[in-house]
Amino acid sequence: VQLQASGGGLVQAGGSLRLSCAASGFRFDDYAIGWFRQAPGKEREGVSCFSTSDGSTYYADSVKGRFTVSSDAAKNTEYLQMNSLKPRDTAVYYCAVRYYLGDGCALSDFGSWGQGTQVTVSS
């Protein structure tokens, strides 16, 4: 099981980026994916994760209404569309596989962390 996040870059505040999380070794239909980010000097935090109790998608309050996840089963890829970006969104973004049932983005529920992609938002 391998994941690879891509699509990061430098963008001005208010701009948009779409991150991709490509999977190999498994089918996206069989697993749920979570998105996380880690800013310099800060702990890794959940951005958006699939909740197994009701099948909903959890979004962190800090990104709610601005970020949206989608997937393309044919490409075995999940996307994180990020709009209205703010400087505080600057971080390395990661995707990971949910291995344990749960809601939200508890780090312990996820594994097979992909290599992250840097997102930098300038003011």
Image (spheres, rainbow, N blue to C red):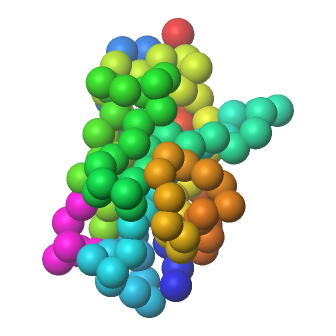
**Horizontal arrangement in the rendering, residue 51 relative to residue 97 (left or right):** left
Give residue 28's position: percent from left, percent from top.
Answer: 32, 75
**Horizontal arrangement in the rendering, residue 12 relative to residue 55 (left or right):** right
Segment colored magenta = 71-76
Q: Residue furthest front?
A: 53
Residue 77, located in which quarter of the rendered image?
A: bottom left
**36 or 61, which is in the foreground?**
61
The count of marks equals 0
Q: Compared with residue 101, is residue 104 higher up or lower down, i.e. above or below?
A: above
Q: Residue at x 54, y 26 (%)?
A: 89
| Residue 47 magenta | no
Q: Is residue 5 visible?
A: no
Give residue 21's position: percent from left, percent from top.
Answer: 41, 62
Q: Residue at x 56, y 54 (%)?
A: 94
Give residue 88's position: percent from left, percent from top.
Answer: 58, 20
Q: Residue at x 20, y 73 (%)?
A: 73
